[in-house]
Amino acid sequence: MKIRHIIVLILLIHNSSALLLSQEPGERTGRSRGLYLGMTTSNFAGSDASTADNKFIPGFSLGFYQDFMINHRYSLETGLLLTSKGSRLDAVGDLYMHQVLTYMEVPVLGECKLIQGEKSNFVVVGGGFIGLKLLAFNEVGFPEEINSLDVGVDIGLGVRFRHFSYRVDVKRGFLSIDKSEPSLDYKNLTFSLLVGISF
């Protein structure tokens, strides 16, 4: 009797494993998770930033994400991302200063599959994020007048394969980064290219 139970258990495990591995990530338990690694380019936006000679600077974004599947077309994504932002500021004459800001961000995004194929899905995402400043620095030192929070909107387009995804995002902050003067209007604007791997 025990041998029969063991054989049945082995068959059940084998069949279940084969079924799970044949499905796309996220279809197994209604959710999927993975890692993001990407590069960013960022600048300051706003009324004061538009009159200054600011330039985009490169950066990075890395972290993990969690997808919650609603149905075959819609899902909800959140996670934790370490993201660098900032701008190259016009100082004096031909001199420039790089203002680099690093945030720990929590995005909350809705995802819709626009085109569904056998091996790939084209998706659009939209939602918001909240970021906590971890570090701010420039060539002079570590400025203390930088706002500790960054809250804004995040939209993007991407393609998902079986275990990989590629996405282009645009993030626009709602809060001015400079808290030294309430009238100053400098907000984060970030474009990112993210490569994801799910497991």
Image (cartoon, rainbow, N blue to C red):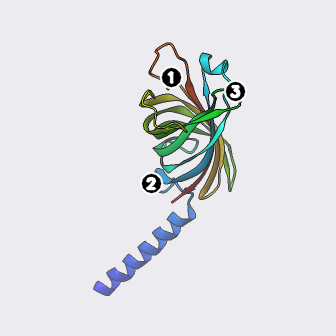
The residue lying at 55 percent from left, 25 percent from top is 187
- Mark 1 → mark 2, Cα distance in angstroms: 41 Å
Report x, y in % for residue 62: 53, 50
* Residue placed under numbered mark 3 in the picture: 93
Q: Mark 1, residues whose alpha carbon is within 10 Å: few (<14), some, or many (≥20)?
A: many
> Which residue is most to the front?
93
* Residue placed under numbered mark 2 in the picture: 29
Between discs 1 and 2, the one toward the N terminus: 2
Q: Are marks 2 and 3 in contact (CB under 8 Å)?
A: no
Report x, y in % for residue 137: 50, 38
- Look at discs 1 and 2 and give the one toward the viewer: 1
Q: Mark 3, residues whose alpha carbon is within 10 Å: few (<14), some, or many (≥20)?
A: few
Badge 3 amino acid: Gly
* Residue placed under numbered mark 1 in the picture: 176
Dot 1 falls on a residue whose secondary structure is loop
Q: Nearer the viewer, residue 196 or 160?
A: 196
The residue lying at 47 percent from left, 50 percent from top is 31
Report x, y in % for residue 159: 67, 47
Report x, y in % for residue 134: 42, 40
Q: Is residue 199 visible?
A: yes
Q: Nearer the viewer, residue 65 or 9?
A: 65
Badge 2 amino acid: Thr
Between discs 1 and 3, the one toward the N terminus: 3
- Mark 2 → mark 3, Cα distance in angstroms: 59 Å
- Mark 1 → mark 3, Cα distance in angstroms: 26 Å
- Figure quadrant of residue 97: top right
The residue lying at 67 percent from left, 35 percent from top is 56
Q: Is residue 68 visible?
A: no
The residue lying at 49 percent from left, 50 percent from top is 63
Badge 1 amino acid: Ser
